[in-house]
């Protein structure tokens, strides 16, 4: 019967029933057959939604949306163009960096391809980059940067897996940079190979681009400085970031008018609501599953068939890529993390390293055919058939998988900055 | 525009206003607490619990608006491939299922709030704890209505396609 209910849940999910409804429905069914009062689901939701850590989510999300609606993306592109434009493949590297920064700020929700893709694709076409190359790069960059703070998936992982957000923020930096660097090296190589024309380096343009973005450049320091020095909690850093961005974009740059604020606030809080309700819904279900000792039973099964840590990691990688491709990042995080993290710990994987493995897999999974969400967003944004994007993304996915292997099998990359 | 749709739009504006107001208070209060703590070594005792309940309200009102705008996170594998008439059923069933589950959750939330009211706990400033919690059954009830109406509109469109415009709203 339970198997049937799970199958029905999967079917409902596939025909487009919202994920939180499916999770709640499953919880309602399981609670009902075990004679637990249904209000237990809302008790868990309420408890999850009032955790002190959660304050960081609306604050960072609002700051990210505010930045994305301001002139910040344009200033960022201009500045990186001035600094890197003269390199072979410079424009491709600029696209990668801008997408990564933008994704970290807006939380990997498909906004990157929609907001930046429209500026970057025509720019790359003008720069004589072959179209499949540009399409593949922008598609796979839709979730690039998810490992950089303060991305929403990092915060969600920390809450679900009960690890420290500040540690996870710091752990993501080197692996995040690695992903950007391997794609950049590949892009430069392709650019040299294809004889892409370069632009000249102009010191005066660098100077004026820096002057234009001078108020936004300290942002990484605002977000991370207090956390890294241990002076501020993550939710406090989020409050400071929100106030800083508000002051900079409204009073200094005047990109955002007062009367636009309610609309931006609403847009960002609708996203927060959609994410929080999944998070709350999953809490009731996972507590039930843990009480029913499902992770323990899974662990016994794993221990029986998989002996070495390396083999476990390989299986984990394949599983998570598939999950990231089909379920999407947020649903995968709230459903899969509580089930798998006790098992991974039994294999001796550091919880922080596990978080980075999870997020790197889900990030790449989002671009993997046939169902990766980035492919569909890009298909709509660039008005190209999905099949064309499948082919265009393949070389980039191959490169990313290589980097993923490094991130998974070298824990040092995630843990070095923590020591 | 039907009476329900006008009501839905008005409600949406009220929710937007509430979201903007609460988020503004959340930002200012959280920031004020940091200043008070670091500069004056003091703080508002009810500040932190208020901020936490604001997150609860913002989250649930945001979720209710997400139902209005179709912004809930879905996986929706099939409709990425299917278009046309089969897709209409694929669009109608999810709304119906969602309305049903939200109805149950409204009931669950209502029981929860009632129990809390009976126990009579209080939170910051002696406010009874069920008052901030009442947002849970309220927003679930709104989501039930919103999903329910959309399911109704989609089914009506399937059986009587001429009277309805493409986006599923009665014309």
Image: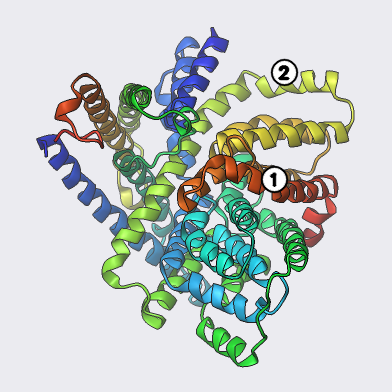
Residue at the spot x=33%, y=27% of the render? B95
Q: Residue furthest top?
A: A1
Instruction: Establish if B40 lies above or below A335.
Output: below
Residue A204 placement (x, y as % from top left): 60, 93
Residue A167 vertical position relative to residue A222 in the rendered view, above or below: above
| Label 2 vs 1, first from the N-terminus | 2
Residue pictured at 62% horizontal, 18% vertical: A292
Q: Check the image and report above or below for A218 versus B124.
A: below
Query: As drawn, is A55 to the left or to the right of B94?
Result: right
Residue toward you, A264 or A45? A264
Residue A368 falls in image quadrant: top right
Q: Chain of mark 2?
A: A
**Residue receiving disc 1:** A394
* Image x and y of residue A92, in percent: 65, 66
Determine which quarter of the picture holds residue A255. Answer: bottom left
The answer for which chain carries disc 1 is: A
Residue at image location 10% in from the left, 36% down from the top? B3
Q: Measured from the top left, where is residue A334 in percent x and y? A: 57, 36
Check whether the beta carbons of the residues at disc 2 and disc 1 lie within 8 A of each other. no
Q: Residue at x 16, y 27 (%)?
A: B162
Query: Where in the figure is residue A381, as x and y percent of width and height?
Result: 46, 52
Q: Which mark is residue A297?
A: 2
Q: Marks 2 and 1, Cα distance to the nearest angstrom?
A: 37 Å
Say which quadrant the N terminus of chain A sits in.
top right
Crowding around mark 2 (Cα neighbors within 10 Å: few <14, some 14 to 19, many 20+) is few
Q: Nearer the viewer, residue A243 or A69?
A: A69
Task: Using the image, determine if residue A260 lies above or below residue B59.
Answer: below
The secondary structure type at the circle numbered 2 is helix
Identify the image's colour scheme: rainbow, by chain, secondary structure or one colour: rainbow
Task: Please say whether residue A366 is visible from this viewpoint.
Answer: no
The answer, for residue A379, to whether it is visible in the render is: yes
């Amino acid at each position: 019967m339970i198997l049937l209910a799970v199958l029905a849940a999967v079917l409902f999910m596939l025909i487009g029933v919202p994920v939180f409804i499916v999770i709640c429905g499953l919880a309602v069914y399981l609670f009902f057959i075990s004679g637990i009062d249904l209000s237990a689901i809302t008790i868990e939701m309420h408890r999850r939604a009032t955790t002190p850590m959660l304050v960081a989510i609306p604050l960072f999300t609002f700051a990210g949306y505010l930045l994305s609606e301001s002139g910040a993306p344009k200033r960022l592109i201009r500045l990186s163009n001035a600094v890197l434009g003269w390199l072979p493949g410079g424009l491709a590297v600029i696209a990668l960096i801008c997408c990564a920064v933008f994704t970290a700020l807006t939380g990997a929700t498909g906004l990157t391809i929609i907001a930046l893709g429209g500026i970057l694709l025509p720019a790359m076409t003008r720069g004589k980059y072959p179209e499949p190359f540009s399409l593949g790069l922008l598609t796979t960059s839709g979730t690039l940067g998810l490992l950089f703070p303060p991305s929403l998936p990092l915060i969600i992982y920390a809450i679900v897996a009960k690890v420290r957000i500040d540690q996870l923020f710091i752990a993501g930096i080197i692996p995040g940079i690695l992903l950007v660097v391997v794609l950049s090296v590949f892009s430069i190589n392709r650019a040299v190979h294809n004889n892409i024309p370069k632009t000249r380096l102009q010191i005066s343009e660098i100077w004026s681009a820096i002057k234009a973005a001078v108020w936004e450049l300290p942002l990484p320091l605002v977000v991370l400085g207090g956390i890294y020095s241990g002076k501020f909690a993550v939710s406090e850093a989020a409050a400071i970031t929100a106030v800083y961005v508000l002051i900079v974009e409204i009073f200094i740059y005047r990109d955002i008018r007062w009367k636009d604020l309610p609309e931006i606030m609403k847009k960002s809080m609708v996203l927060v609501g959609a994410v929080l309700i999944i998070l709350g819904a999953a809490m009731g279900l996972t507590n039930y599953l843990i009480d029913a000792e499902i992770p323990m039973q899974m662990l016994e099964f794993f221990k029986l068939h998989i002996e070495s840590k390396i083999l476990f990691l390989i299986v984990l990688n394949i599983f998570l890529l598939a999950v990231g491709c089909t379920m999407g990042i947020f649903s995968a995080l709230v459903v899969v993390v509580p089930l798998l993290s006790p098992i991974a710990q039994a294999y001796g994987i550091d919880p922080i390293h596990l978080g980075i493995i999870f997020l790197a897999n889900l990030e790449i999974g989002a671009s993997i055919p046939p169902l990766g969400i980035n492919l569909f967003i890009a298909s709509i944004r660039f008005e190209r058939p999905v099949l064309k994007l499948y082919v265009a993304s393949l070389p980039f996915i191959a490169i990313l998988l290589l980097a993923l292997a490094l991130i998974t099998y070298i824990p040092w990359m995630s843990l070095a900055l923590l020591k | 525009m039907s009476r329900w749709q006008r009501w839905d739009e008005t409600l949406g504006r009220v929710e937007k206003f509430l979201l903007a107001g609460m988020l503004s208070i959340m930002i200012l209060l959280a920031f004020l607490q940091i200043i008070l703590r670091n500069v004056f070594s003091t703080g508002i005792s009810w500040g932190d619990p208020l901020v936490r309940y604001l997150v609860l309200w913002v989250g649930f009102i945001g979720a209710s608006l997400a139902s209005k705008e179709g912004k809930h996170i879905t996986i929706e594998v099939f409709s990425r491939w299917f278009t046309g008439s089969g897709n209409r059923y694929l669009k109608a069933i999810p709304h119906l299922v969602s309305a049903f589950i939200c109805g149950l959750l409204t009931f669950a939330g209502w029981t929860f709030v009632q129990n809390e009211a009976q126990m009579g706990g209080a939170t910051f400033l002696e406010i009874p704890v069920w008052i901030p919690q009442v947002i849970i059954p309220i927003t679930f009830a709104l989501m039930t209505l919103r999903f329910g109406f959309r399911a109704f509109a989609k089914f009506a469109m399937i059986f009587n396609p001429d009277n309805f415009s493409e986006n599923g709203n009665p014309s």
